[in-house]
Image (spheres, grey):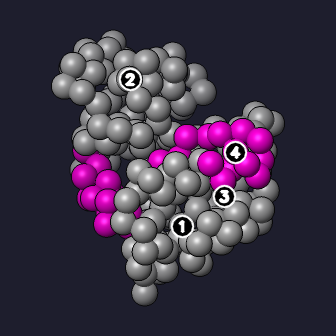
Amino acid sequence: MTVVISMLRGVNVGGHHKIKMDALRALYVSLGLHHPQTYVQSGNVIFTTAERNLVRLARRIENGIEQSFGFRPDVMLRTASEMRDVVAGNPFATRQDIEPGKLLVNFLAAAPSPEARRRILQLQTDPEQLRLAGRELYIYYPHGVGRSKLSTAVLERTLQTSSTGRNWNSVTKMLALAEALAR
């Protein structure tokens, strides 16, 4: 069985697309996923599965949410191993001035094309700092996400793929939950 971390885009944000976490866990069980655990109210679910095709699994989850809750959020999946790589690959890890709550990892639905990678790295983002690594975009928001002009819409338009962001505290907590489930 593989431990997978599922992150839903735009759930329980601003009073829109509401899902209670107990209902979300029940849906995952109904989809044949094992031991689902949720973390905070934004649609993070850690579970085990025998499914190896994560693209197909993401579509199954999206279909299930649409049928059960009447809307279709994008679902980003990462295995526990991939999440360990995300944490190990943090390009800001050696900096002492980084506040974990202001470091966001945007999990991309697909790897951006070389052209999209070039465009995202050319964006004028000061004071925010961007680092792209595979299907993750690390962004440090020194003044907080809420004050930034670097919106999700700009990022997704530039990268030509959907994404969902989680702050560093959430990323490391989800990894800890995934590792505990693996044991």
Q: Earlier in the sequence, mark 3 or mark 2?
A: 3
Q: Decide whether residue 78 is among the magenta residues.
A: yes
Q: Decide whether residue 153 is among the magenta residues.
A: no
What x and y, as percent, mark residue 24?
71, 60
Looking at the image, residue 48 sits to the left or right of residue 53; the answer is right
Q: Which residue is mark 3?
A: 40
**Depth order, front residue of 110/130:** 110
Q: Secondary structure at mark 1?
A: strand
**Mark 4: few/some/many CA within 10 Å (<14, 14-19, 20+):** few
Q: Which residue is mark 4?
A: 66
**Mark 3: few/some/many CA within 10 Å (<14, 14-19, 20+):** few
Magenta-colored span: 63-91
Q: Secondary structure at mark 2?
A: loop
Q: Which residue is mark 1?
A: 46
The mark lying in front, picked from 3 and 2, is: 2
What x and y, as percent, mark residue 14?
75, 33
**Mark 1: few/some/many CA within 10 Å (<14, 14-19, 20+):** many
Q: Residue at x 77, y 35 (%)?
A: 16
Q: CA distance from mark 4 to mark 1?
A: 20 Å
Q: Secondary structure at mark 3?
A: loop
Contact, CB < 8 Å: mark 3 with mark 4? no
Q: Which residue is mark 2?
A: 160
Contact, CB < 8 Å: mark 2 with mark 1? no
Contact, CB < 8 Å: mark 1 with mark 3? no
Q: Earlier in the sequence, mark 1 or mark 3?
A: 3
The amino acid sitting under disc 2 is Gln
Q: Residue at x 27, y 59 (%)?
A: 85
